[in-house]
Image (tube, grey):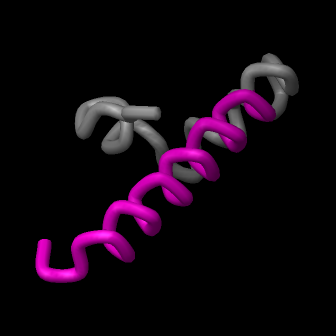
Amino acid sequence: MKISDHNLRQIDAESLHALRHRDLDALEELALRLANALKEAKEMKRKNPRR
């Protein structure tokens, strides 16, 4: 799962706080996307540690 650099730069405490009050489902989806992206990045790093 890819998350663009632009989208990643948009995530900060203020945007998360606003999202929590506006749309809990969207916040949960974002958390899952971030967790999956982190897992994928760690797996890629494990497979190719020199990158």
Residue 29 occupies which quadrant of the picture? top right
Q: Residue at x 80, y 34 (%)?
A: 28
Q: Is residue 15 shown left or right of residue 3? A: right
Residue 32 occupies which quadrant of the picture? top right
Q: Is residue 18 shown left or right of residue 12? A: right
The C terminus lies in which quarter of the figure? bottom left
Q: Is residue 26 above or below residue 46?
A: above
* Image coords of residue 18 (percent x, y): 69, 31
* Image coords of residue 40 (percent x, y): 47, 53
Q: Residue at x 55, y 58 (%)?
A: 39
The residue nearer to you, when weighing 6 against 3, is 3
Q: Residue at x 23, y 72 (%)?
A: 48
> Residue placed farthest to the bottom in the image?
50
* Image coords of residue 35 (percent x, y): 63, 51
Q: Is residue 12 shown left or right of residue 27? A: left
Question: What is the magenta range?
Answer: 27-51
Q: Is residue 4 above or below residue 9?
A: above
